[in-house]
Amino acid sequence: MGAPSADQAGEDRLHEDRAGADPAHDQPEGHRLPAEASSGASSGERAGPRPGAGSGRGAQTRRAILDAAIARFGREGFRATSVADIARDAGVSGTAAYAYFAGKEALFLAAVDEDAAAVIAEGLSSALDQSGVPDWPRVVLGTLVEAVERHPLARRLLAGLEPEVTVRVLDIPALAELRKLAAERLRSEQLAGVARADVDPAVIADGVVAIVLSLLMSIVQLGAEAAAQYGESVAAVLSAAMTPVAGTGAGAGAVSPDGPPG
């Protein structure tokens, strides 16, 4: 009997990703979760496209694989999904996914980042991207709650159904962009005199995003009614952190575009 063909070898490799594999051990040593988590590499570096993901047909193929991954992971989760399943859903050959993603973990993280970016884009469309929106953290939270319902993969992560990778998801580029946009919004409000000038916009933005994520998790896991009892308290905390103290004057302690004085 002759040696297996390259295509057959690729198919055999795909079946190593079958359901029930431990995400910390279902990849070669260089791709395992603990090693990557301690390497300092960004999620974009871990989950980003491999060679062949440029423009044209390659970009279309990668897009099809990513869309199929978002749908399949959102519906069935990491453990119950294989790369072969995703390739089949995308209508590509079994080995095609490996031309764009290093393995199942990399494809999962890329799918999560893409879906989270879509949720955030929908949430920001009515708040951070528009000036003059009062109480924008609350507006962002409300729109994000609505957006999450349209994105099963993001909702799955918030529901705590992927505990092996949830912590790593905090480093995805989509959340970094949300923190950046929130800091820019707060900095512009400081310059306009409608936000406290004695706080670091980047630090407060990190806190706002952390609070919003915590509330989203609570709403998804406990229900809106259970989380609603804390709504006013959270709003009060955010207001205290950002609203100028009465009697100090709108321009008191005004900051430069580079941030508050040291």
Image: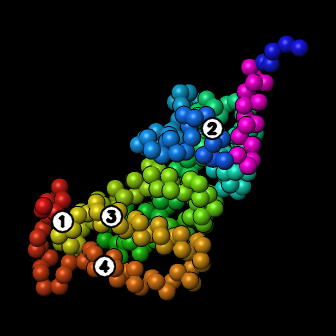
- How is the protein colored in the picture? rainbow
Q: Can you identify the residue that label 2 sits on?
A: 27
Query: What amino acid is at disc 3?
Result: Ala
Mark 1 vs mark 4: in front: 4
Query: Which residue range is magenta in the image?
Result: 6-21
Q: Can you identify the residue that label 3 sits on?
A: 205
Residue shown at 54% from the left, 57% from the top: 166
Q: Can you identify the residue that label 4 sits on?
A: 239
Q: Which of the 4 image quadrants contains residue 181? A: bottom left
Q: Can you identify the residue that label 1 sits on?
A: 191
Q: Earlier in the sequence, mark 1 or mark 2?
A: 2
**Prevailing SS of the magenta stretch:** helix
Q: Position of residue 93 (x, y in %)?
A: 73, 31
Frontmost residue, 184 versus 229:
229
Marks 1/3: CA distance? Answer: 16 Å
Frontmost residue, 240 versus 185:
240
Is any atom of residue 72 visible in this view?
Answer: no
Q: Are circles 2 and 4 on residues that touch, CB within 8 Å?
A: no
Label 1: which secondary element: helix
Residue shown at 40% from the left, 53% from the top: 176
